[in-house]
Image (cartoon, rainbow, N blue to C red):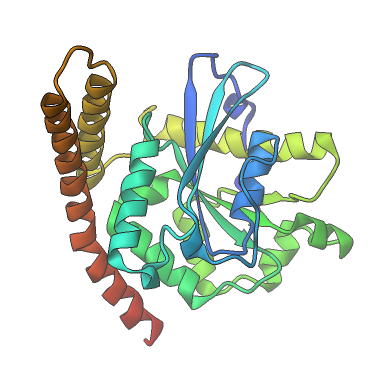
Amino acid sequence: MGGSSIDDDWELTSSSNEVRTVVLVGRTGNGKSATGNTILGRKAFKSRASSSAVSTSCELKTTELNNGQIVNVIDTPGLFDLSAGSEFVGKEIVKCIDLAKDGIHAVIVVFSVRTRFTEEEETALRSLQTLFGSKIVDYMIVVFTGGDELEENDETLEDYLGRECPEPLKEILVLCENRCVLFDNKTKDEGKRFGQVQQLLSFVNMVLSRNGGRPYTDELFTQLKKGAMELHNQQREVDSLKGYSKGEILEFKKQMQQTYDEQLKRITEMVPFLSMFFYINHFI
């Protein structure tokens, strides 16, 4: 069970004015940040496998490929750490959506071949579907990190999945039509790093094409994006204010805070349900 095949039609042919925004999700220690750095071609995210997921926040970093295409990478430490509390998770979700100004073109789910697939990961992915809707799987691509370890053992990704693929993981791969890539984030071989990223971004283009060229959206996402756009517009108004009184500027800022609070309220009302969902599934 390896990666889905990619025809020549799915090679990167994007024009310079196109932007791709991908969101990295996965358990702390699986190599999300390192994968983001490989995609970006530089050490943009702090990669700390042993750090607490709660101590950091969503970040967006950008790179420009040789063909001029812009790729935005959003790292989400703690985004689905439901034990962190509804307010924290709510703020992280709002921030993630706010950062994805051009929409989400792919969700990169990061696993590691060094660790076993856990019930917590299964539950977190269910929570992802519960929060963002079942259609999110149409935008999912799986990255397995630890390619260097498989290479040392003369194993392929197919070999690994043949012996270390529990039923829940098989179901995830089926849901995302077997779109999976093996990453070696430690390699110094530039050709190998380029090939990994090329394969991943080809999957991103495939996902986008199969979804009619439209980035991910659903009713909740649309509502939150609308709120985010209102917030951005209000911020631009505040930034351009000249000749206004302090009272008028404070009123603008008050409206901005109200827009943000409304966004946060929508999310935090859902998070307790997700936390309960996580708790119940953990003990089933």
Q: Quadrant of the C terminus?
A: bottom left
Q: Is residue 213 above or below residue 172?
A: above
Quadrant in which residue 199 is drawn: top right
Residue name at image x 62 percent, y 36 percent: 6
- 49 or 154: which is nearer to us? 49
Q: Is residue 27 above or below residue 230?
A: below
Measured as percent of width and height from the top left, residue 147 is found at 76, 55
- 180 or 60: which is nearer to us? 60
Residue name at image x 61 percent, y 39 percent: 200
Please identify the residue farthest to the front as the structure is shown: 246
Quadrant in which residue 216 is drawn: top left
Measured as percent of width and height from the top left, residue 283 is found at 38, 87
Residue name at image x 11 percent, y 28 percent: 247
Quadrant in which residue 269 is drawn: bottom left
Total number of numbered discs in the rendering: 0
Q: Quadrant of the N terminus?
A: bottom right
- 87 or 133: which is nearer to us? 87
Measured as percent of width and height from the top left, residue 8 is found at 64, 27
Q: Is residue 198 above or below residue 84?
A: above
Measured as percent of width and height from the top left, residue 185 is found at 74, 49
